[in-house]
Image: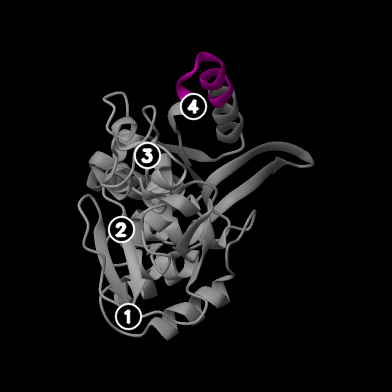
Amino acid sequence: MRQARNLGVSSGRLQAKRLTAPFHGVRAQRLITDLERVTALFEVLPPHTFACGPTAAVLHGMPLPLALEWQALQRPVIGVALPANRIRRAGVVGRALRLRPGDVGVARGIRVTTPARTWVDLAALMSLPRLVAVTDHLIARRRPFISLAGLHQVHAEAGAGRGARARADALILCSAGSESPRESELRAILRLAGLPMPETNVEIYDHERFVARVDMLYRAAGVVVEYDGEHHVTPAQWSRDQRRRAELESLGYRVAVVTARDFDDPTAMISRIRRYLSAA
């Protein structure tokens, strides 16, 4: 609002009923998206503030559980570097963080903690399988934010404290070859249940003919584990999936299919895949 007044906008116009007030001191002419709300918030925050934790993760495009992502945008987490006092403002969560040089950068035009520092802060807020999904995203072979070695260094420099054990475990369970958060989460669940670590995103051939690229493969047992997301429910995709599985089974592979509903009962899912491996 201060900026609007400096531009000559009257107080009466700023109080017009057609304007929305996403935060104290912020006015918008229309309904705005959650990301636009966060951007507008930084117009009225002190210049030394930055987004951190889940809010920084959303701005970086990191995969978060939907509930945590929603919360991160509805009540943005705003940080300052110690010894400054944390921000106290309605509608936001204030944090005062001990930062290292280079811990703050820019994403979507907003000051944020870097992806690596954000990973450190998320470790105490998420389940280990979900943290593995974030770790895989950061080191993904297709578009890495940071190398695995670099993430190990960040972990060591962060030291002990909340989330340290989770970070260490995530670094053991992560894979640069994973191509979706659900695949990452599934792989971590299987490994934590005591099953062997599968190969990820493996190409299967019949001699020189390409057959399929599978999400996970237990090569010695000849077991393929596939995660079928929402896009697999269309008739055309379903037909392609059936033909692909028939090809794999004709080559001697057993195909275990996992869907989003299986994450509601991971014990049953683990038992099913364990039976596949035992049968081999």
Locate residue 244, reporting x and y percent.
Answer: 59, 29
**Cα gap from disc 1 to disc 2, whole angstroms:** 16 Å
Locate residue 58, reporting x and y percent.
Answer: 42, 50
The residue tagged 3 is: 34
Q: Nearer the viewer, residue 72 or 90?
A: 90
Instruction: Indicate the amino acid at tag 4.
Output: His
**Cα gap from disc 1 to disc 4, whole angstroms:** 45 Å
**Cα gap from disc 4 to disc 2, whole angstroms:** 33 Å
Q: Nearer the viewer, residue 243 or 47?
A: 47
Determine the secondary structure under disc 2. Answer: strand
Tell me which numbered mark, 3 or 1, is placed earlier along the sequence: 3
Q: Are marks 1 and 2 in contact (CB under 8 Å)?
A: no
The quarter of the displayed image where residue 67 is located: top left
Instruction: Indicate the amino acid at tag 1.
Output: Leu
Q: Main secondary structure of the magenta part?
A: helix
Q: Is residue 50 above or below residue 99?
A: above
The residue tagged 1 is: 82
Locate residue 44, reporting x and y percent.
Answer: 37, 54
Tell me which numbered mark, 3 or 2, is placed earlier along the sequence: 3
Residue 55 among magenta residues: no
Instruction: Indicate the amino acid at tag 2.
Output: Val
The residue tagged 2 is: 77
The residue tagged 4 is: 231
Q: Is residue 115 above or below residue 69?
A: below
